[in-house]
Structure formats: C-alpha cells, structure tokens
Image (cartoon, grey):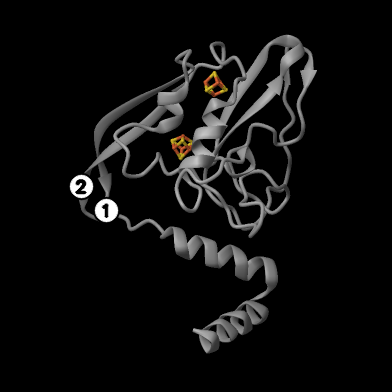
C-alpha cells in the first residue's frame, strides 16, 4: 500500500441536453494543443469530440481518455431515441481499432490534459451554453506514479511498428542528432 496524499480531482460535468453541437470546444482544444500554440485548429486533433445526431437535436461531448494498447474483446453499440450509433461511439479510449483520439499525422494517442497550465479548461470557457462545467475537489489518494505522456506515446509507436523497427528508427535519429 502506498502513502496517502492529497490530490485535486478535476471534473468536467457534461450536460448533453444543453449541447447544441456548435463544436467550439473542438476548435479551441485543437488550437490550444497546436504547435506552436494557437497556430492552427483541426478538430481531428481535439481531445473532445461531439457525437452528433442533428435530426434529433442530439449532441454528446466525449472526452479523450486513456490510451489502450489492445482493443476490447467486445464492442458497445448504443441506441438513443431510436438512432443507432456507430460501434464504440461514446468510448473515451484511444484504441487500435479506430482513428478517433489519435494525432492524425503521427497516430500518437490524444488524451485530455485538462488544459495543463490554464486556470480553467478552455472547452468549458468556450462553451456558451454551459453544457460543460468545471469542478475541483480535494481527495486522499494512493501515491502511485502515473505513466508519463512521453512513455505512453513511445509505447504506442512500438506497438504500431514493432519493437525492432521502432528501435532502428530511434538509432537512425540519434545518428542524425
Ligand atoms: S462548445 Fe458546448 S455547446 Fe458547443 S459543441 Fe462543445 S459542448 Fe456542445
Ligand atoms: S479540458 Fe482542455 S485538453 Fe481537455 S478537452 Fe477540454 S480543451 Fe481539450
């Protein structure tokens, strides 16, 4: 058992009934994470995606969660108000079985980082209809070190291209550096 320590739990509450599908949250998220910051926007790079069904005025914001190296043994399929959504439509994982929540050029997994360094998540600030609201609370948690973003990215590349090809690429890059 690790030691207990205080941790700020950050929560974004999603009220899907208020979401109007404007996608401002996707725009600001992708712009904030562009390199350099705010140099471009592309919703395919956003860590929040809006699952849409405009005919029934249904829009459901879904946040990018953890990277998973292997897809699930089964699939989810939701029917809401008579509309059958694509398999895994509401899943938060960056997973090998689909393209959502992956950096389009590199294929690296994307994960919501709560806009690290900002006082409030930008998707919340940009949501004019309060479909997204931000809350913080303090909790006692086990002191377990989380894997670093770089480690997760490298692991996904090694899984995608194979360990040997990945190591060869690193060796080539270090020769050039
Ligand atoms: S900014 Fe708000 S209303 Fe617009 S799509 Fe995102 S969650 Fe929905
Ligand atoms: S909290 Fe920040 S990183 Fe997460 S989805 Fe919203 S804008 Fe993107």
Q: Residue furthest front?
A: 39
* Left or right: 165 as drawn, with respect to 171: right
Camera-side residue of 18 and 66: 18
Q: Say which element carries label 2.
A: strand
The yes-or-no answer for disc 2 within 8 Å of ligand 2 is no
Camera-side residue of 37 and 44: 37
Residue occupying the point 42% across, 59% down: 147
Q: Position of residue 114 (x, y in %)?
A: 40, 39
What is the quadrant of the N terminus in the image?
bottom left
Q: Say which element carries label 1.
A: loop
Residue occupying the point 25% across, 36% down: 139
Q: Residue furthest bottom?
A: 175
Q: Position of residue 99 (x, y in %)?
A: 70, 47
Res 49 quadrant in image: top right
Q: Choose the circle earlier in sequence order: 1 or 2.
A: 2
Residue occupying the point 42% across, 27% down: 12
Q: Is residue 46 above or below residue 12?
A: below
Local packing at callout 2 (Cα closer than 10 Å; few below 14, some 14-19, many 20+) is few
Q: Which mark is residue 161?
A: none
Res 8 quadrant in image: top left
Residue occupying the point 39% across, 33% down: 121
Q: Position of residue 152 (x, y in %)?
A: 50, 61
* Left or right: 69 as drawn, with respect to 136: right
Q: According to the image, label 2 marks what residue?
A: 5
- Find out whether the residues at labels 1 and 2 contact each other: C-beta distance under 8 Å: yes
Q: Is residue 17 above or below residue 21?
A: above
Q: According to the image, label 1 marks what residue?
A: 143
Q: Position of residue 137 (x, y in %)?
A: 26, 30
């Amino acid at each position: 058992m690790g030691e207990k320590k205080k941790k700020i739990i950050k929560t974004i509450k999603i009220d899907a009934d208020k979401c109007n599908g404007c996608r401002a949250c996707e725009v600001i998220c992708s712009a904030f994470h562009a390199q350099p910051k705010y140099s471009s926007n592309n919703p395919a790079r956003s860590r929040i995606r809006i699952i849409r069904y405009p005919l029934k005025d249904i829009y459901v914001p879904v946040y990018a969660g953890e990277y998973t190296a292997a897809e699930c043994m089964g699939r989810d399929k939701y029917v809401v108000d008579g509309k059958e959504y694509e398999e895994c439509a509401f899943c938060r994982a960056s997973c090998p079985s689909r393209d959502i929540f992956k950096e389009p050029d590199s294929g690296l997994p994307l994960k919501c980082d709560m806009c690290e360094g900002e006082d409030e998540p930008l998707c919340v600030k940009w949501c004019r209809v309060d479909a997204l609201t931000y809350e913080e609370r303090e909790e006692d948690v086990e002191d377990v070190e989380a894997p670093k973003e770089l480690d997760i990215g490298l692991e996904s590349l090694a899984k995608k291209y194979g360990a040997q090809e990945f190591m060869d690429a690193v060796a080539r890059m270090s020769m050039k550096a």
